[in-house]
Amino acid sequence: MQRFPLYIAGQFRDAAGGEWFETENPYTLEPWAQIARGGPADVDAAVAAARTAFESGWGRSKPAYRAGLLRALADRLEQAAGELAQIETRDNGKLIAETGGQARYLPSWYRYYAGLAENLEGRVIPIDKPDVTVYTRPEPLGVIAAITPWNSPLMLATWKLAPALAAGNTVVLKPSEFTSASSIALARIFDEVGFPPGVLNVVTGFGAEVGVPLVAHPKVAKVAFTGGESGGRGVYKAAAERLIPATLELGGKSPNIVFADADLDQAVKGVIAGIFAATGQTCLAGSRVLVEDSIHDAFVERLVAFAGRAKLGDPADLATQVGPVTTRPQYEKILSYIEIARAEGARCVLGGGPAPHPAGGKGLFVQPTIFADVTNDMRIAREEVFGPVMSVLRFGDQDEAIRIANDSDYGLAAGVWTQNLRRALEMSDALAAGTVWVNTYRAVSYLAPFGGYKASGIGRENGAEALAAYMFHPGSSYSSVSVPAAAGARGVPGAGRGRESG
Ligand code: NAD
């Protein structure tokens, strides 16, 4: 069985406690690799290595130097995309079509932030004091704790690593205990490319044993966390205790809103892909589908017909449309929500239970499930299921759609299906969501800021905003230097140095 050790100070090493844990392939439920079980001593070593790397040069290095390494990393990642996608699919069960797409897209993040970092500039400020030159300089924060969940480990790590490193920070990455392998595979590529030891460190292990001591560590300058609400609250409290910033990317209950004036063929496909792709295990799943009254029944029929044909199977097979659930706790959670929905009076029109393994194996599958007659006060409409379960709600007009959509504790994303341009713009304006898609769904880019309103999180990843979030902004430097005024400047009010104050 393959082993994935820790990566600290440029060394691949066993955990201090010498322990390993197994990671399973969700399709077969067979263990396929062993992961080093890090603990507080490993966190100490990783943070110390990151701090040393920061102080001994990386933190003061020229952006062009860091950009060169990030571009070399991007080139190498391009070659490794197929291999990384296979590891990801084997470890978390996401469809290879999706992990492949994500892996091929990762280099764009490193190239984009390499360029942005090279364009970081300060300002010279002509302040009101004589003989004083003031300039500002963007400065990195120090050691960043990056914590990722199990659903898209490489992509969500990259959203943190690329801007953090480009800005001159060093990083300790802690991936989810369920899907750690790809982060160590990524560290191998950093190592090959020649990043200085300690610039990236990866400590695998459990939330309580690695995540908690990492966030509480006195030398960590910022936490970038993607995960569930309860972990997010814990991280935010710990960051507050230490007065350090935290970016939180949390869950969602995103509305996908279909108006009668939509291109309905396009809307059916978009709505289905919005929830059943990734088996619903994505933060931006369009899990609340709001359908206008006049088309409601016909549209639900089409959803049922379309989703009913979904091909469940091996996520490593390109023809598979719905893969397994990644973990047993997640599987049990999904089934419990299906029961809750039934008990609340929602009408199950498709699926509604476990699905047999398509090849008679042990992996855990849930039928693509659709509930109709859902009202927005039901738990199935308010709480994140993180599985292939769609709730369909009706609305009468645009105002009601907005009211239902925004009546949520979450605000990560929203979809709107309409061919009416005015409506599209009004909806984009009115929806309380970090991202609004019109006639498309689940598109993200390194160029556009991404993040949530309300319980979906704090701060933004991607785009120029993410680079700013990894820097002190700006550091002002006051230098008092007496320079004799130029002859021509004498007597010109405001032009000479020190003339005004005599
Ligand atoms: P999780 O919160 O259980 O774990 C996320 C990570 O945090 C893991 O590495 C875990 O070990 C660690 N962790 C947990 N508690 C911690 C604590 N108190 N201190 C420090 N570290 C801690 O989340 P999960 O189940 O792995 O992921 C699913 C969740 O992630 C869903 O809610 C989903 O919506 C969310 N998510 C959000 C986004 C986004 O960008 N908004 C993207 C993907 C997933």
Image (spheres, rainbow, N blue to C red):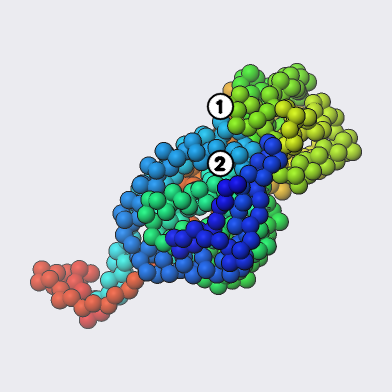
**Percent x, y of residue 344:** 88, 38
* Mark 1 or mark 2, whichever is nearer to me: 2
Q: Amino acid at mark 2?
A: Ile
* Residue lying furthest front: 1
Q: Which mark is residue 421?
A: 1
Tell me whether circle 1 and circle 2 mark residues in contact (CB < 8 Å): no
Work out how far the residue at label 1 is from the one at label 2, CA to CA, in angstroms: 43 Å
* Residue lying furthest left: 487
What secondary structure is marked by label 1? Answer: helix
**Percent x, y of residue 109:** 44, 44
Looking at the picture, tell me which residue is in the foreground, 171 or 398.
171
In the picture, measured across the screen, residue 259 lies left or right of residue 131, that is right
In the picture, measured across the screen, residue 129 lies left or right of residue 327, that is left
Mark 2, residue position? 87
* Residue depicted at 56% across the width and 41% down the height: 87
Asked if one can make out residue 304 in the rendered structure from this viewpoint, the answer is yes
Other-residue count near label 1 (Cα within 10 Å), few / some / many at <14 / 14–19 / ≥20: few
In the picture, measured across the screen, residue 240 lies left or right of residue 46, that is right
Residue 108 position (above or below residue 200): above
Question: Along the polypeptide, which appears first: circle 1 or circle 2?
Answer: 2
* Residue depicted at 53% across the width and 38% down the height: 85
Q: How many marks?
A: 2
